[in-house]
């Protein structure tokens, strides 16, 4: 783990300047446990205990403790429990609470064959899968935007798996194009949908409603088979004359 330290004011500035910092500021009561050697200097013992918890996940806070300020001791005398000293305090805490699907920034720390390691705030490790399309972007020292896919906690140390937003957007665009692709006209073998009619039927109906007269020749009105029979009769009559 990288023990980078972010001061309280710096953490507040990050919260104000970065929309997706995943930092939250809370005012909470917390029990502090420290070694008896600080019995003559309670405040020193409390500060040392808090320092040892920096960047580690706390169940009480629901995230990793980043910074603290405005410490107020709640009692004059502490409780001794085998042989550690227990004190309750109230303070302002800034906690890192990432969520799956959240957006974060990280700096490429190490590059491996199939993945790269990013550091968020110089503290939390993020693993991102490496591919031909993102290899150039994931060069050591580059800052990249990514989406949190999974969150892990091991021995109170928080780490994540992520995917680059550039790749996420590309994948969504491809999926959307596939879903939105529709044919303008049905294929010849494709059945028509219920209620769908051909344009020519509609146009014919319009002509009838408008009262437009359509001129029809007698010859055109005869069936095709009848026309053929008339031609045969004419041929026979010619033969008879000959």
Image (cartoon, grey):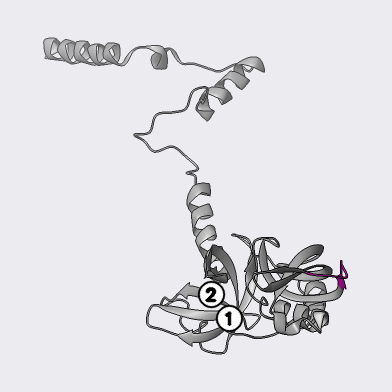
Seen at 50% across and 80% down, the residue is 117
Residue 56: mark in rendering = none
Q: Is residue 103 magenta-colored?
A: no
Residue 21 seen in the figure? no
Residue 126: mark in rendering = 2
Q: In which quarter of the view is residue 238 placed? A: top left
Q: In the rendering, at what x and y percent does residue 215 appear?
A: 53, 17
Q: Quadrant of the N terminus?
A: bottom right
Q: Is residue 75 magenta-colored?
A: yes
Seen at 53% across and 74% down, the residue is 126
Q: Are marks 1 and 2 in contact (CB under 8 Å)?
A: yes
Residue carrying label 1: 119
Separation of disc 1 and disc 2 at Cα? 6 Å
In the image, the segment drawn in magenta is 72-78
**Few, some or many C-alpha atoms within 10 Å of disc 1 (few <14, some 14-19, many ≥20)?**
many
Q: In the rendering, at what x and y percent does residue 57 appear?
A: 63, 68
Seen in the image, is 82 located left or right of residue 164? right
């Amino acid at each position: 783990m990288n023990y980078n330290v972010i001061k309280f004011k710096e953490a507040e500035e990050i919260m104000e300047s970065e929309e997706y910092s995943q930092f939250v500021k809370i005012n909470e009561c917390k029990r502090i446990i420290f070694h008896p050697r600080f019995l003559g200097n309670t405040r020193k013992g409390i500060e040392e205990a808090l320092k040892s918890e920096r960047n580690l996940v706390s169940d009480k806070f629901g995230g990793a403790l980043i910074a603290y300020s405005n410490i107020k001791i709640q009692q004059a005398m502490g409780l001794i429990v085998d042989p550690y000293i227990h004190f309750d305090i109230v303070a302002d805490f800034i906690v890192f609470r990432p969520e799956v699907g959240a957006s974060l920034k990280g700096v490429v720390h190490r590059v491996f064959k199939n993945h790269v390691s990013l550091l968020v705030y110089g503290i939390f490790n993020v693993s991102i899968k490496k591919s031909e399309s993102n290899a150039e972007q994931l060069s050591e020292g580059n800052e990249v935007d990514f989406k949190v896919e999974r969150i892990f906690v091991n021995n109170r140390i928080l780490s994540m798996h992520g995917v680059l937003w550039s790749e996420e957007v590309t994948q969504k665009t491809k999926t959307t194009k596939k879903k939105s692709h529709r044919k303008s006209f049905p294929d010849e073998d494709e059945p028509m949908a219920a209620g769908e009619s051909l344009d020519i039927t509609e146009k014919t109906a319009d002509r009838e409603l408008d009262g437009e007269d359509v001129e029809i020749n007698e010859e055109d009105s005869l069936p095709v088979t009848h026309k053929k029979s008339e031609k045969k009769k004419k041929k026979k009559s010619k033969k008879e004359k000959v």
